[in-house]
Image (cartoon, rainbow, N blue to C red):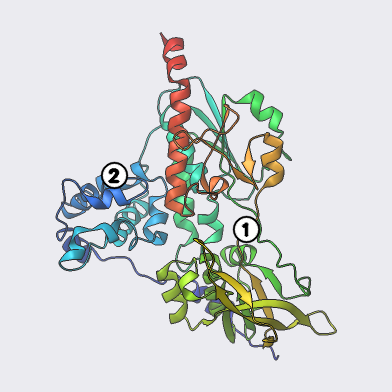
């Protein structure tokens, strides 16, 4: 294919935040629609338990600082969640006004309040008095930051060990800029840092600092490492130039401007939120055509409904009941086509319908780029170095305390997602981080009181 030119400035504009925030008049009017329910179902529907009627009432009365504090007190990544939470399934889905008109725009109001705090450079919380205990948090994503924030408020000396250049994890690197600008996540990181939490970036536990040093140097450890890279498909042609990891691809658009996708035909394998992000990124990078290839149907896709609608509006095409067979390339080693086979769903007893290939239904899609978005692998090496119980890399924890098989180590976030544990949402990771922090505090509470007596 010929090269299509797209300027770096055009790409920057394409990656500007899509949805505008509420205007003051609109926010006040929407706040005044709220019934301020005493036994509010929206609070119960929020995994972090934000007092939603309270923060909305504060907007209506002009108490913006109080509103932002109410949100961030319950959810240390509340600014991010105002943009990326599936609110129609959570708080807004539970709003009592669904029965009579339309739900309160809770997510937009949450963004309005936290955006105010960001613009006005508010420091919302203070660290607690030192209790003489220390905690190492491995991973600076939503779960790790939430744990660190709560622990600092309990008076622990906290150090976060983050492998990347910046903390924030998925929020900083893994969610497309036009939905979540990076400065939002970095502001949340700063809210934690300003509590006196030490955040050591570019530091890999087990490589740059040993497990033994962590065990000896800290009273407790919170493991919040998230997930690793996208696994391979196990088909021929995956080493060709033009086959990309969706996680790395989205991250590249958060840290630089890339012009190599312009004019190209892109196939994204998978139908989760990361696949949608990779597809919509490709559109904004100037791809000539973008297809999502999925072996099941729209009914089985794991992406949120609003993500699916967003992709369709962006012109992304969907190739349902289609599985990749191999990737072919030219003599120079560049991708030229994706060979696929048609699938059909076969019912299973009491389980998810199983996709089965239809013999002889092979066909080719002419593409230049194949982006793999078929889930993520686990950090097996680090988990095994820690010596804690796990099932295929999913760390086993006590449901109430997030404590692992090692009483010194607690875990939260995607590292415990799977096997019936947790949910793969930013807001769920934040709540798990809080739970782990509370459990650490309870573990040491009696000892702290004895030592201070």
- The residue tagged 1 is 376
SS under mark 2: helix
Q: Residue at x 50, y 72 (%)?
A: 15
Residue 361 is at least partly visible in this image: yes
**Residue at the farthest bottom position:** 2
Q: Label 2: how many residues lie within 10 Å, few (<14), some (14-19) or many (20+)?
A: many
Q: Picture coordinates of residue 338 (x, y %)? A: 70, 82
Pick the front one: 117 or 221: 221
Specify the farthest residue to the right: 331
Question: Horizontally, is 437 left or right of 296 in the view?
Answer: left
Tell me the distance, in whole angstroms, between the alpha carbons under discs 2 and 1: 34 Å
Residue drawn at the location 50% of the way across and 46% of the way down: 421
Looking at the image, residue 85 lies above or below residue 405: below
Which numbered disc flags the more N-terminal residue, 2 or 1?
Answer: 2
In this picture, residue 200 sits left or right of residue 313: right
As drawn, the residue found furthest toward the front would be 349
Residue 76, quarter of the rendered image: top left
Asked if residue 109 can be seen in this view, the reply is no
Residue under label 2, please give it. Answer: 70
Q: Nearer the viewer, mark 2 or mark 1?
A: 1
Q: Quadrant of the C terminus?
A: top left
């Amino acid at each position: 294919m010929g090269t299509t030119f797209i300027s770096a400035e055009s790409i920057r504009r394409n990656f500007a935040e899509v949805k505008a925030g509420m205007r003051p008049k609109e926010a006040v009017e929407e706040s005044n629609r709220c019934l301020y329910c005493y036994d509010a179902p929206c609070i119960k529907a929020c995994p972090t338990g934000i007092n939603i009627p309270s923060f909305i009432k504060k907007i209506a009365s002009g108490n913006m600082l109080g509103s932002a504090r109410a949100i961030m007190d319950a959810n240390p990544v509340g600014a991010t969640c105002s943009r990326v939470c599936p609110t129609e399934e959570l708080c807004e889905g539970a709003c009592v006004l669904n029965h009579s008109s339309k739900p309160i725009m809770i997510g937009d109001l949450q963004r309005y309040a936290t955006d105010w705090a960001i613009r006005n450079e508010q420091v919302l919380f203070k660290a607690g008095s030192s209790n003489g205990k220390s905690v190492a948090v491995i991973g600076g994503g939503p779960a790790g930051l939430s744990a660190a924030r709560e622990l600092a408020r309990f008076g622990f000396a906290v150090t976060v060990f983050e492998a990347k250049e910046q903390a924030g994890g998925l929020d900083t690197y893994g969610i497309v800029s036009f939905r979540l600008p990076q400065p939002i996540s970095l502001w949340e990181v700063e809210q934690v840092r300003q509590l006196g939490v030490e955040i050591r970036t570019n530091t890999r536990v087990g490589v740059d600092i040993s497990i033994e040093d962590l065990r000896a140097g800290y009273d407790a450890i919170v493991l919040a490492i998230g997930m690793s890279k996208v696994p391979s498909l196990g088909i021929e042609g995956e080493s060709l130039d033009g086959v990309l990891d969706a996680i790395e691809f989205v991250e590249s658009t958060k840290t630089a401007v890339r012009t190599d996708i312009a004019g190209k035909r892109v196939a994204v394998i998978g139908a989760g939120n990361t696949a949608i992000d990779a597809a919509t990124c490709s559109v904004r990078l100037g791809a000539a055509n973008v297809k999502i290839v999925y072996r099941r149907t729209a009914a089985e896709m794991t992406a949120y409904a609003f993500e699916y609608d967003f992709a369709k509006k962006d012109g992304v095409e969907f190739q349902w009941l289609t599985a990749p067979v191999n990737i072919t390339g030219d003599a120079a080693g560049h991708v030229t086509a994706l060979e696929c086979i048609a699938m059909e769903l076969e019912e299973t007893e009491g389980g998810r319908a199983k996709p089965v290939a239809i013999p002889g239904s092979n066909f080719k899609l002419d593409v230049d780029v194949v982006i793999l978005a078929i889930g993520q692998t686990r950090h097996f090496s680090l988990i095994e170095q820690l010596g804690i119980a796990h099932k295929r890399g999913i760390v086993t924890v006590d449901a109430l305390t997030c404590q692992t098989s090692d009483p010194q180590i607690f875990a939260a976030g995607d590292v415990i997602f799977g096997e019936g544990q947790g949910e793969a949402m930013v807001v769920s990771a934040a709540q798990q981080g809080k739970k782990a922090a509370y459990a650490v505090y309870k573990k040491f509470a009696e000892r702290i009181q004895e030592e201070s007596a």
